[in-house]
Amino acid sequence: MQLQGSTVLLTGASGGIGRATARALNARGAKLLLSARREDVLEEIRAELGGRPDVLAVDLSDRAGPATLAERAGAVDVLVANAALSAGGRAERFSAEEIDAALDVNLRAPIQLTRALLPGMLERGRGHLLYVSSLSGKVASPRGGLYSATKFGLRGYASGLRQDVEPRGVGVSVIYPGFISQAGMFADSGARLPPWVGTRTPQQVAEAVVSAIEKERAEVDVAPLSLRAGSMLAALAPVTLGRIQRRLGSEGVAESIAQGQRPKR
Ligand SMILES: NC(=O)c1ccc[n+]([C@@H]2O[C@H](COP(=O)([O-])OP(=O)(O)OC[C@H]3O[C@@H](n4cnc5c(N)ncnc54)[C@H](OP(=O)(O)O)[C@@H]3O)[C@@H](O)[C@H]2O)c1
């Protein structure tokens, strides 16, 4: 998939990873449609990118949000489904509305956007669907059950979808960032990691997004080897990995991330 001249719809464009991804896609010559709720932030990014992108402010937690966004976007060659809520905390401390918002923004919206945009891609025999999951979509942590439910869900959806649509000319990628420094939901939480846990930057996630689209890569981790190895062990022995995580102090880290992210529920 060539990004130059392709129309790319990017959700979550006003966030830490979204902004870096908008810059990277713009630099490849994509015609960008930037979406999120905060129109003022989207306008600021549009101005930074020389006024080239279009801005579509839509709330994806609304029932009609994804369909409205797809309709306003028109013909889209590439979907980058990046918007999400951090949704960390103990299960009994979420309101029913907070649970719905996390499921709607993180999982329902990407699936509904796909449903709306895919027929056009199939008709043109050309398109790409990219979902920003998380290493939490491969390994769950304390306080992370709801977030992981949405991020594991994206992986499952994309894995099945890929087999249906790739033979018909539409690529499917999933990106799995670990802890991202500098900007975005983890950095904004103010939580501190133990010194042995490495991070990656929003720019590295953005580069992974560009390369996954251009090189049709199915799955890309953006995390240090230690975290990637942990996610592999989680697939083989989730209970053992959970015990190891807790011995290494994951409860304290997870609690401080959840506290720091509370305003973003
Ligand atoms: N940062 C990390 O360490 C990390 C690690 C792994 C995975 N990820 C994933 O990377 C992606 C980007 O995260 P980030 O770190 O950039 O987070 P972020 O800075 O909190 O940005 C989240 C984005 O989602 C949008 N959003 C939230 N609720 C929305 C709603 N109801 N309707 C429409 N848009 C909504 C926000 O825009 P508005 O507030 O303007 O609506 C914002 O643009 C997410 O999928 C996240 O799960 C992040």
Image: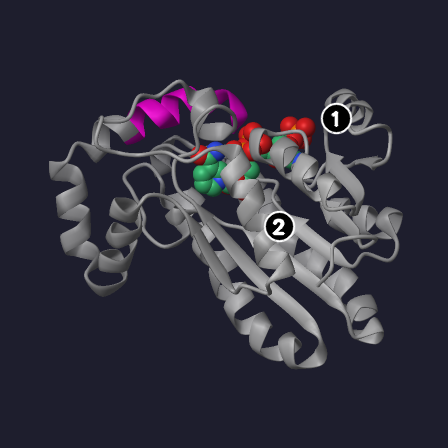
Q: Is residue 14 magenta?
A: no
Q: Position of residue 211 (x, y in %)?
A: 58, 54
Q: Is residue 179 left or right of residue 198?
A: right
Question: Along the horizontal axis of the image, is 257 left or right of 53?
Answer: left
| Residue 236 quadrant | bottom left
Sooner in the amino-acid sequence: mark 1 or mark 2: 1
At x 78% / y 29%, what residue is drawn?
Answer: 49
Q: Is residue 197 above or below residue 241?
A: above
Disc number at residue 45? 1
Mark 1 lies on a secondary structure that is helix
Tell me which image quadrant ligand 1 sits in: top right
Task: Tell me where residue 156 appears, x and y as whole percent.
Answer: 48, 65
Residue at x 56%, y 44% (from the top left corner): 207
Residue at the location (38% across, 21% down)?
Answer: 259
- Amino acid type, label 1: Ile
Magenta region, main secondary structure = helix
Amino acid type at circle 2 is Val
- Residue 214 percent across, percent down from the top left: 64, 59
Per the image, the residue denoted by label 2 is 210
Q: Nearer the viewer, residue 245 or 85?
A: 245
> How many numbered discs, if any?
2
Q: Position of residue 116 (x, y in %)?
A: 77, 61
Q: Secondary structure at mark 2?
A: helix
Colouring scheme applied when the structure was drawn: one colour
- Position of residue 14 relative to residue 159, above or below, is above
Is residue 1 placed above or below 207 in the rendered structure?
Answer: below
Q: Which mark is residue 157?
A: none
Residue 97 showing in the rendered view: no
Q: Residue furthest bottom?
A: 167
Question: Who is closer to the viewer here, 105 or 29?
Answer: 29
In this picture, which residue range is highlighted in magenta?
254-265
- Between 210 and 228, the residue placed more toward the observer is 210
